[in-house]
């Protein structure tokens, strides 16, 4: 499991000669030229071209991923609470429709979205990608939070209702504080799904709004493949997810095991 990541890291630290050597070199003189090329975008070493736009791609990923997760949580919390605690017609059908967005092939959505976005002016915009990412993050957010909300004892909710809380007061004062670990793990996983999304931005974004997943393939040209810079871009792109996961690791473990044992 670790070896592919180790190989990418080693590739990002190699010069072009070491990179293409046969057999592959595991002992070599490391260089940071590939990382410097991501930042300053000037010709270095044996490279014939560099891509100076990676910083923009990284910023695009941050804007789009944070925006998509924020919108999903804002819309998903009341939706998940309704599915967990209220009874209404077609409740199960609605839940199934939401879940269906997760297993329907993306191509079923991306062509209509492309046509709609062209007409509404949302193509190649951050807002357009944030809305499109809801097909990835919103169903996941709703179903994850629904399961966490259902783990909160109903008696606590009833006690709060007797004390005069409305359904909104119960949600804000009781359900959300008790579901903190579940919300944390949902946010983290939603961010990772958004950050790693490739198909939607490939079809709905332009160079001004490419995230790092699509931006990394810009190192492939008809002349050559800049393996070192692509590997460096992959390592840099993985850092936010790694750092964020390590910072909230205890919440991820606790959130994924909530309700596992009765």
Image (spheres, rainbow, N blue to C red):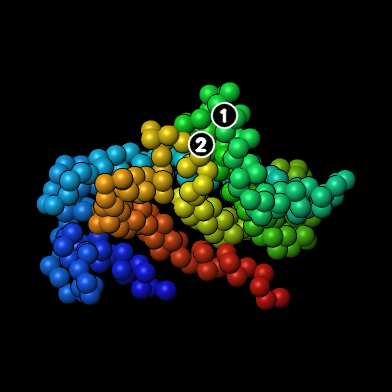
Give the residue pinned by disc 2.
Answer: 204
Q: As drawn, is 225 to the left or to the right of 134?
A: left
Q: Do the residues labelled 2 and 1 touch (CB within 8 Å)?
A: yes
Mark 1 nearby-residue class (10 Å; few <14, some 14–19, many ≥20): some
Quadrant (top left, top right, bottom left, bottom right) of the C terminus: bottom right
245 lies above or below 95: below
- The furthest residue to the front: 222
Give residue 140's position: percent from left, percent from top: 62, 53
The answer to whether residue 80 is visible is no
N-terminal-most mark, 2 or 1 = 1
Instruction: Name which residue lies at 16% across and 62% down.
Output: 17
Instruction: Name which residue lies at 70% across and 53% down.
Output: 99
67 lies above or below 151: above
Give residue 219's position: percent from left, percent from top: 30, 48
Q: Nearer the viewer, residue 73 or 25?
A: 25
- The furthest residue to the right: 89
The span from disc 2 to disc 1 (Cα, nearest Å) is: 8 Å
Q: As drawn, is 67 to the left or to the right of 72?
A: left
Query: Which dot marks residue 179?
Result: none
245 lies above or below 93: below
Q: Nearer the viewer, residue 73 or 203?
A: 203
| SS of the residue under disc 2 | helix
Query: Which dot marks residue 117?
Result: 1
């Amino acid at each position: 499991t670790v070896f592919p990541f180790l190989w990418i890291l080693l590739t990002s630290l190699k010069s072009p000669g070491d990179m293409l050597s046969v057999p592959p070199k595991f002992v070599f003189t490391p260089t940071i030229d590939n990382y410097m090329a991501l930042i300053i975008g000037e010709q270095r070493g044996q490279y014939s071209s560099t891509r100076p736009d990676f910083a923009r791609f990284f910023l695009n990923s941050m804007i789009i991923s944070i925006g998509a997760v924020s919108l999903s949580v804002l819309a998903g919390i009341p939706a998940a609470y309704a599915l967990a605690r209220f009874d209404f017609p077609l409740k199960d059908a609605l839940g199934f429709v939401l879940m269906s967005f997760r297993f329907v092939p993306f191509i079923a959505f991306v062509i209509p979205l492309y046509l709609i976005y062209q007409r509404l002016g949302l193509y190649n915009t951050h807002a357009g990608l944030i809305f499109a990412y809801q097909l990835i993050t919103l169903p996941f957010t709703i179903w994850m939070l629904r399961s966490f909300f259902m783990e909160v004892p109903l008696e606590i909710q009833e006690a709060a209702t007797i004390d005069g809380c409305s359904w909104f007061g119960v949600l804000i004062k009781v359900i959300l504080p008790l579901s903190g670990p579940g919300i944390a793990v949902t946010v983290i996983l939603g961010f990772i799904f958004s950050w790693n999304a490739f198909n939607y931005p490939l079809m709905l974004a332009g160079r001004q709004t490419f995230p790092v997943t699509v931006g990394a393939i810009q190192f492939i040209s008809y002349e050559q493949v800049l393996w070192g810079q692509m590997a460096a871009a992959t390592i840099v792109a993985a850092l936010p997810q790694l750092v964020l996961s390590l910072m909230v690791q205890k919440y991820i473990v606790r959130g994924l095991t909530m309700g596992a044992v009765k």
